[in-house]
Image (cartoon, coloured by chain):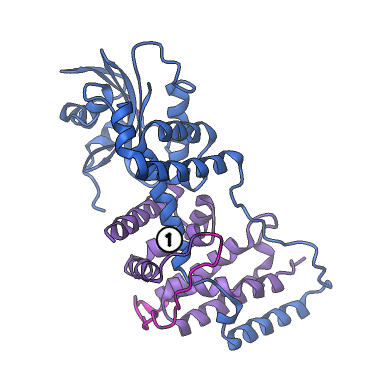
Amino acid sequence: MPAAIGQELVALLPRLRRFALVLCRSPSLADDLVQSACERALANADSWAPGTRFDAWVFRILRNNWIDHLRRLRTEGMKEDVAAQMEIVGDAGEEPILSRLLLAEVQQIIDTMPPEQREVLLLVCVEDLAYREAAEVLGVPIGTVMSRLARARKRLVEMTAAA
Amino acid sequence: MAQLHFSDEILMAFADGELDEPVAATVEQAMASDLAVAKRVAEFLRSRHLIRSAFPSETASDVPPELRAAVQAQVDRFERHATQPTSSGGGQASQSVPSSGRWRLGMALAASLAALAIATGGYLAGRQGLQPSSSGPIANLTAPEVNRTLSESPSGQDQDLPFGRMRVISTFRMANGPLCREFQLQMPSGTSNAVACRDHDWVITFATASAPTNDPYVPSGGADLMASYLQNAGAGEPLLGSAEMKALSEAQPQR
């Protein structure tokens, strides 16, 4: 019996699109990627194990689609200038407001990181996936998640500490 | 007092609420006694906050209407095909946000210590004198003799070094590939158990040290602590006999 994942999938669209932007850095490509991932998720709804994180499951599908896409195209790039599209919006939570300048700087540092660091930053620091869940999405051992994550975050701290 | 060395990964895992209890408790104790450790944890907390803030917040309005419509159409098509009427019974994604009391306590401690480190760091560090002493076993873990013994000596043999006796306990690979060895260094000033991983040279990734006197501060025995660390770090099965010597003799893979 297929689980009714449709509405959850629609609710997940903004976050799927954000992850897709991190992966491919092109808004139009990101939309295609999200759409193909949703198609595949719907077709394979049975393979999602209830009780596990639905978002992590779809993230993994989306990322696998992206890898497939790269393999088919045998290309790295197709990068549009994504900076113009990605508005820098700080979270309006209870935390102290960071200066727009600092946020812009952090955004820029993240943009220059290798893709394997950017994606793990998003999954753990923004999407709050546990290391183990991120490892499953990325298809790498948990130790790899930890070393990539630690390296990226140390670099970020070092580069912003001078300010 | 126990002296500890923590890798970035372990301190980050603490900041992220990902450590098992025995190791997390040890990190907390180390933070309380060593402001440098507290500062490193605070930096991992800060980086997480910075990254979260810098990513664009995901709002429904960011999704182009065409994309939303296309996905909704896919959903409708699939749900029409579903033989059963869809009840919305299942399927809330379970959030695995860390919520243990330990984790929250750690965060509060990190935040307060970070503030303390900025405000009074020099004063406390000078007053408490908690830096690893230069004659203790921790200070010798990076000595060239230790490095050489790690590269050459099979597990289970004692080696006499100028400053003490060293024994490699086991050899294994971490989940992410590097070859690592657990070893013990005994000196008149105390004993250290440590793990070193090979990255061209041997890099110490974890170490415990205990003074020769009875030390009431060591939480649960170095062996438990080491076992917890190895489990957290994803250590593989020990390499034995010829497999160990073969791994040691292999050239460091280019990374």
Residue A122: x and y in percent read 47, 63
Q: Which chain is blue?
A: B
In this rendering, would B156 be left or right of A53? left
- Does the magenta-highlighted stretch encompass residue A154? no
- Total numbered badges shown on the rendered structure: 1
Height in image: A16 above or below B201? Answer: below
In the picture, the quarter occupied by the N terminus of chain A is: bottom right
Residue shown at the point (34%, 53%) measured from the top left? A154
In the picture, the quarter occupied by the C terminus of chain A is: bottom left
Badge 1 crowding class, 10 Å Cα cut-off, few under 14, some 14 to 19, many 20 or more, is many
In this rendering, would B200 be left or right of A98? left
Residue located beneath label 1 in the image: B50
Query: Mark 1 is on which residue type?
Result: Leu
Q: Which chain is purple?
A: A
Q: Quadrant of residue B137?
A: top left
Residue shown at the point (42%, 75%) measured from the top left? A24
Residue B177: x and y in percent read 35, 45
Magenta residues, as a range? A71-95
Residue shown at the point (23%, 52%) measured from the top left? B254
> Which secondary structure type mostly characterizes the magenta part of the structure?
loop
Height in image: B86 above or below B198? Answer: below
Residue B104: x and y in percent read 56, 43
Query: Can see residue B186?
Result: yes
- Does the magenta-highlighted stretch encompass residue A88? yes
Query: Can see residue A43?
Result: no
